[in-house]
């Protein structure tokens, strides 16, 4: 049996190649061992080629993915740069709007610091959406674009208001919209219970604004002083005519700093806070009359 197997291994396979041209045929003789080795070699080479092909394909995919990530990163960087530029421009625009608003306040004679009502705080841009998830750059960019449109509209409105204020400066200066004192409103315009212990109701024709004794009292608008004296019940009182039927009154002062006939400008100091006359404590009784009738000062004050 062993001799038969050994004999088969030593046997050879003859391959005969006969060309069509009629040339001499070529003969090749290969043993079974050589054929087996050739098959193994071919299989091994095929495996190496397949493995190399897989590696090349994976490498190309990795390079393609890296290029895609790089391109996406570059686009994001460009978006971030554009967003930063937009934010810088919007900040400059906000400063321009505030400067024009301040110009308007100076022209009109109002001051936000003298307004007892708290001004609303500005919102801030954040990176979290209303649903609680982080927002991507496209969402933030869209929000900034919407905000930019709103700021453009606001800037146009402020610019138109500034032009209007400049064209009507004299009329605006005579509007009594400047808070006469920094303090707390203790009594408003209208019917109220008497502060002197009586249970009856009385009509209060102005605002009572409590402030520390001696605090400055300022004119609510440009005008001419038509009264500056002591008046029973009101103590030291000042009345200013602003034209167009408007008159303002400041009562219970500790000192009057202007006299009848003086011209005053909006925001100028005209008296000191006191409690003269019929009063329960240091405050200013501030009234506005229109054509001789008292009106609610809050209709004019910002």
Image: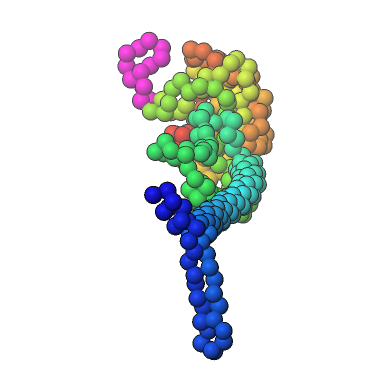
On screen, residue 47 above or below 215: below
When the figure is inspected, residue 50 is found, relative to residue 299, above or below; the finding is below
- Residue located 46% across and 28% down the image: 206
Q: Magenta residues?
A: 191-203
Q: State the residue in front, 163 or 219.
A: 163
Residue 60, picture quadrant = bottom right
Q: Measured from the top left, where is residue 249 in percent x and y? A: 54, 30
**Residue 84 seen by the camera:** yes
Task: Name the residue furthest left.
Answer: 200
The image's colouring method is rainbow
Tell me where residue 36 appears, x and y as whole percent.
Answer: 49, 57
User: Within the image, what quadrant is residue 105 found in?
Assistant: top right
Percent position (x, y) of residue 301?
A: 51, 35
Q: Residue furthest top?
A: 197
Instruction: Say how many tags the image has.
Output: 0
Q: Residue at x 54, y 81 (%)?
A: 25
Residue 46 in view here: no
Residue occupying the point 52% across, 64% down: 30
Q: Reply above or below: 208 against 64.
A: above
Q: From the viewer's perspective, is 100 left or right of 282?
A: right
Which residue is drawn at the image coordinates 51% and 42% (left, top)? 245
In-front residue for pair 164/39: 39
Verify whether residue 55 appears in magenta: no
Query: Which of 69/269 is in front?
Result: 69
Residue closest to the eye, 241 or 172: 172
Residue 133 in the image: state x and y as whole percent.
43, 38
């Amino acid at each position: 049996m062993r001799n038969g197997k050994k004999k088969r291994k030593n046997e050879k396979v003859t391959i005969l190649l006969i060309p069509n041209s009629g040339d001499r045929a070529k003969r090749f003789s290969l043993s079974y061992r050589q054929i087996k080795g050739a098959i193994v070699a071919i299989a091994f080479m095929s495996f190496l080629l397949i493995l190399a092909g897989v590696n090349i394909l994976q490498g190309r995919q990795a390079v393609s993915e890296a290029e895609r990530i790089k391109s996406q990163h570059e686009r994001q960087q460009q978006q971030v740069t554009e967003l930063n530029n937009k934010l810088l421009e919007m900040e400059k625009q906000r400063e321009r709007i505030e400067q024009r608003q301040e110009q308007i306040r100076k022209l009109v004679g109002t001051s936000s610091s003298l307004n007892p009502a708290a001004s609303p705080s500005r919102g801030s841009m954040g990176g979290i959406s209303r649903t609680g998830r982080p927002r991507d750059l496209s969402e933030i960019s869209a929000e900034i674009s919407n905000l930019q449109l709103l700021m453009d509209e606001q800037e146009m409105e402020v610019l138109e208001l500034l032009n209007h204020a400049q064209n009507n400066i004299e009329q605006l200066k005579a509007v009594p919209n400047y808070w006469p004192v920094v303090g707390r409103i203790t009594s408003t315009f209208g019917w109220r219970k008497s502060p002197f212990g009586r249970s009856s109701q009385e009509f209060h024709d102005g605002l009572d604004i409590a402030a520390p004794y001696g605090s400055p009292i300022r004119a609510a608008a440009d005008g001419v002083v038509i009264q500056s004296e002591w008046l029973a019940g009101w103590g030291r009182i000042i009345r200013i005519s602003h034209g167009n039927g408007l008159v303002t009154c400041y009562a219970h002062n500790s000192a009057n700093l202007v006299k009848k006939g003086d011209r005053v400008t909006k925001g100028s100091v005209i008296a000191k806070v006191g409690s003269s006359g019929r009063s329960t404590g240091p405050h200013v009784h501030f009234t506005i009359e229109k054509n001789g009738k008292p009106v609610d000062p809050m209709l004019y004050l910002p």
